[in-house]
Structures are given as C-alpha cells and as structure tokens.
Amino acid sequence: MRRPSFEELGRALDEQRYFADEGLLTAIHLALVLERPLALEGEPGVGKTEVAKVLAAILGRELIRLQCYEGLDAAQALYEWDHPKQLLYARTGEATDLYDERFLLERPLLRALRSPGAVLLIDEIDRADSEFEAFLLEFLSDFQITIPELGTIAAPTAPVVVMTSNRTRELHDALKRRCLYHWIPFPDADRERRIIAARAPGVSAAAAASLVEAVASVRRLQLLKPPGIAETIDWAHGATVLSDAGVPWPTALRCSLGLLLKEAEDVEAAAALLT
C-alpha cells in the first residue's frame, strides 16, 4: 500500500485540521515508511489519540482501538473462544473440532492482524499493567500472535500502530525499543491560534489571540491538571457564547473557566490570574 510523501502527509494532516509541528510530522512519516509502531507521550489533551484517527482518515484504513485499563489481559485484547457456542455445538454433535475458526471471537489485536493495513490505536498503554506490556512484545516485533489451538497468525500487511501514554508510569525499555518514540508538547501560540480558527471558527482573530495568551499564562501556573487543546477549544466556544450575549470578553473568559479547568483549585488560581 502506498505511503504518502512527507509533503503529502503534511498537507493531508492540515486538511484534516490536525496541525502537527515539524517534529511530530517527521515522526509520523518515519513510522509509516519504516513500518514501526509510533509511541506518543505527552500531557492529556495534546492530540495523541487524534493522530491515529486522522491517519485512518488520510490512509483510508479501518481504525481499530484498544482502550487500555488496569487489569486488561491478553484474552480481552487478543481473542477469546466462544464457549457457549462451543458447548451448543458439542451437545448437538454439529462440530467435531471445538477450536475451529467459527468459535473464535476477535479482539482488537487479532482483528488488526487480519485487517490489511489497519490503523491500530493502543490508547493509554500506561493505564494497563506492566505484564500486559510484556505480552505486546511479540506482537509489536513481528506483527504476529500465536494461538495454541490454531498456530501462528501473522499480518499479511503490517498495521499502522499508534500507542499513546499520558506518562502516569514509565513504560518498559523493551517496549519502547520496538517503537519510534515522540513526545508531543503543548502547541506554541501560533499553532494553537490555527487550531482555534479551524475548530472554533466563530471566534474572532483578536479574541483567539487573547484566549491563547490566557491559556499560556494558565498553563504556567502550578495546576493539578493543565488544560489540553480540547479544553482550549471548549473554552473558546463557551466564552464566545457569553460574549455574543453582551458579556465583556475578559469577563466571559473568567466565567467560562469551568470549560478549561476541571479542578476547583485550578479554577480558583486561574480566576485570580485573569482578574
């Protein structure tokens, strides 16, 4: 399957209203060309998950998502046998081999191997247990898995793998070595203004500039949860609603802080800053 060139990828991301800086664009391009999993880390809300979504749209591929959580195990991520169906067929004598393909329930990883060129999003891997990381090593190294009853299943075409982490814990070195790693920082002012213009077109250029400046100031505070890009866009929409109703823009920003920040202490600190 054809991979877009560096320039084509940049244009396609812009068309999807995802404004990647040169570092992220380079990381995505190399991951595609080298067929390496892309490991993205960064604060919540900087657009890590969105990378997989826009790549699926750009490449015209199926997006398969594995949402990680504490206690996630191989069966839930890979495959399970349909035991009730096996039991039914065993009772009726309709099947002699109870470990036939028809009794196999695909989970995200197996489905990604069988869907040519699919985009596989392994989201928030840091929420899963470290034991699950060890299980991923074979999958990420060779894009294959072994089912004892059926043998080894390998992907005819390597999936595009995007793995995200909010860095709530350190990932194993062995897992990182199998990936192309990139840290996504908060966007600079110019890029955040472009994002607001694309995602909140009702906000004037002057209002967007003042909002981006305010967000940058808020992020410099000692916050429990710094706001991400999605919260910035929500704040822009909310402040605009109040502004259109006649509320002065600075007041509109303060009154809609609950769209930007989600902790009482953070809202209090930001309100004091914006007074």
Image (cartoon, helix red, strand yellow):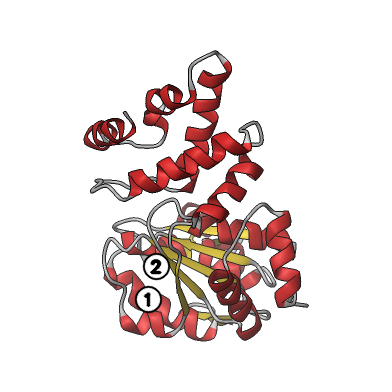
In the depicted view, which residue is nearer to us: 155 or 229?
229
Q: Quadrant of the C terminus?
A: top left
Q: Which residue is drawn at 62% across and 59% down?
A: 63
Q: Are marks 2 and 1 in contact (CB under 8 Å)?
A: yes
Amino acid type, residue under disc 2 in the picture = Ala
Q: Residue at x 34, y 70 (%)?
A: 132
Q: In which quarter of the image is the N terminus?
A: bottom right
Disc sitting over residue 135 in the figure: 1
Q: Is mark 2 on a helix, strand or loop?
A: helix
In the displayed structure image, the side of residue 170 where residue 166 appears, left or right: right
In the depicted view, which residue is nearer to us: 135 or 220?
220
- In the displayed structure, 117 sits above or below 247; it is below
On the image, the x and y values in percent for residue 237 come to: 54, 30
Q: Residues within 10 Å of mark 2 (few under 14, many from 20)?
A: some
What residue is disc 2 on?
74
Q: Which residue is drawn at 29% across and 57% down?
A: 70
Q: What element carries label 1?
A: helix
Q: How many labels does the image show?
A: 2
- In the displayed structure, 88 sits above or below 110; it is above
